[in-house]
Amino acid sequence: MNRRIAIFPGSFDPITKGHENILLRALPLFDEVIISIGKNSLKQSYFTIEQREKWIKQVFSKEPKVRVEIYTGLTIDFCKKMNADYILRGLRTSADFEFEKAIAQNNKVMAPEIETIFILPVSELSAINSTIVRDIIRNGGNAAPFVPEGIDLKS
Ligand code: ADP
């Protein structure tokens, strides 16, 4: 049987407890999950790609089924390159749903063999997003409650 490989694409700027939760809950479904940091030349990130990658590796250092990669271009092309048949995404809000629905349906036309799998956040983590975490940091607040254990956003 084919190995079940999923990619979990995103900006992870920075990784939050929401991302961590989605990934950990998806992990039993797959043989490997590749956290894929999208490098978008049109979108300025807050943290460098090296920093974001380092934190993700730190969070999942004890999970042999998790890998981290950086990619540019279309997510479906990166999936094919990684031999992944699944794209993993989280759905926090109805706005997420509308946005993700359009992308997943268009991806399905371009790459019918790839399935997008959605996981709903647990209620206590559904309000967390990287934009808010960045805002807290920018304004000198303590973002520690929103990021995985052991992540020092000042490091
Ligand atoms: P993008 O810029 O592609 O939205 P993000 O890093 O913001 O990338 O998110 C990556 C994925 O993680 C998305 O599918 C997003 O919905 C999901 N996600 C982010 N925060 C949460 C959360 N708190 N609960 C569930 N899913 C989340």
Image (tube, rainbow, N blue to C red):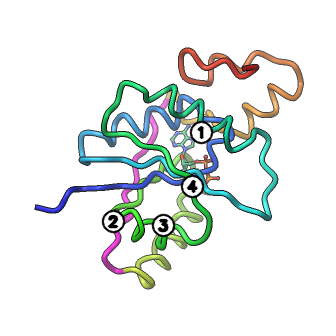
Whichever of callouts 4 and 3 sits on the residue coming sooner in the sequence is 3
Between 70 and 30, the one nearer to me in the picture: 70
Question: How far apart are the alpha carbons under marks 1 and 3?
Answer: 17 Å
Q: Residue at label 4?
A: 94
Looking at the rendered structure, the kind of residue marked 3 is: Phe
* Label 1 SS: helix
Indicate yes or no whether the magenta region holds residue 53: no
Determine whether label 2 and label 4 are within 8 Å by CB.
Answer: no
Q: Residue at label 1?
A: 53
Neighbours of disc 3 within 10 Å: few (<14), some (14-19), many (20+): some
Neighbours of disc 2 within 10 Å: few (<14), some (14-19), many (20+): some
Residue 46's spot in the image, x, y percent? Answer: 79, 41
Neighbours of disc 1 within 10 Å: few (<14), some (14-19), many (20+): many
Residue 140's spot in the image, x, y percent? Answer: 87, 19
Is residue 29 shown left or right of residue 111?
left
Q: Which residues are magenta?
A: 112-123
Residue 23's spot in the image, x, y percent? Answer: 41, 39
Q: Nearer the viewer, mark 4 or mark 1?
A: 1
* Label 3 SS: helix
Query: Does any atom of ligand 1 lie closer than 8 Å to the CB of label 1?
Result: no
Residue at (61, 70) in percent of width and height: 73
Whichever of callouts 4 and 1 sits on the residue coming sooner in the sequence is 1
